[in-house]
Structures are given as structure tokens and as C-alpha cells.
Image: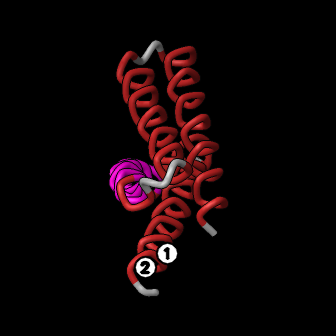
Amino acid sequence: MLDSIKIYLFIFGVLTIAGGVMGYVKARSIASIVAGGICGILLAAAGHLVGTGKVQAGLILGLVISLALAGQFVRKFLATKKFMAAGMMSLLSVIGLVLTVAGLIMKIAP
């Protein structure tokens, strides 16, 4: 399961960076590219930590970033009902939350 979480965090990170770039291209939003870049890099770092044996640190980092993104995008999706990009990021964030919490539970409970 940890391999799946690691891969998901990498993919989520890349998609988050891509979303930030798209936000910049479409709306010239500096905030989108900065936030997307930082969050995407941190998600990729979380995946790297999970893959290199620092599992708990990687899962906690992934959980924190997923929670932050969910807080932003779930609220935005509920207000706009637009799947792109708020709905997609909401879905990806919630999946990230579920996977990282499941990974932490697996790590704690033998």
C-alpha cells in the first residue's frame, strides 16, 4: 500500500504544479503558480520521503498539504459547482487525505 501512496503523492504533486501553471496562463494569477508550485513540490517531497523509508514524515507532510488543498478547493467547488479546477482538486485532495490517513493507521497499528 505504501508504494501506491508514494505514487499517488507524486502524481498529485505533478497535477498540482500543472494546475498552478494553468491558473497563471489563464488568469495571470501569480498566486496560482506560487501556491501550485510550492504545494506540488511538497507533495512530491512527501512521496519521496515515503519511498525512502521516512514513511511517517512523508505521510504527515502529505496529509497536511492534502488538508490545506481540500480546505481551499472543497469550499470553492461547493460555491461554484465547477469541476475544473476546483472539483478536480477537491477530489484529488480528499483522496490524498484518505490515503495518508490510511497509511498512518497502517504504520501505527501493526
Three-letter amino acid code at the position of disc 1: Ala
Which residue in the protein does label 2 denote? 105
Three-letter amino acid code at the position of disc 2: Ile
Q: Residue at x 39, y 29 (%)?
A: 38
Residue 70 on the magenta span: yes
Q: Are marks 2 and 1 in contact (CB under 8 Å)?
A: yes
x, y percentage for residue 92? 57, 54
> Which residue occupies the foreground of this view, 15 or 84?
15
- Report which quarter residue 59 is drawn in: bottom left
Q: Which residues are magenta?
A: 58-77
Q: Residue at x 42, y 86 (%)?
A: 109
Instruction: Relative to 21, say whether 54 is above or below.
Output: below
x, y percentage for residue 85? 57, 41
Residue 2 on the magenta span: no
Disc 2 and disc 1: Cα gap in Å? 5 Å
Asked whether, in this view, residue 42 is left or right of residue 18, the answer is left
Instruction: Relative to 91, say whether 37 is above or below.
Output: above
Instruction: Relative to 1, say whether 76 is above or below.
Output: above
Q: Residue at x 44, y 75 (%)?
A: 107
Instruction: Relative to 74, say whether 110 is above or below.
Output: below
Q: Main secondary structure of the magenta part?
A: helix
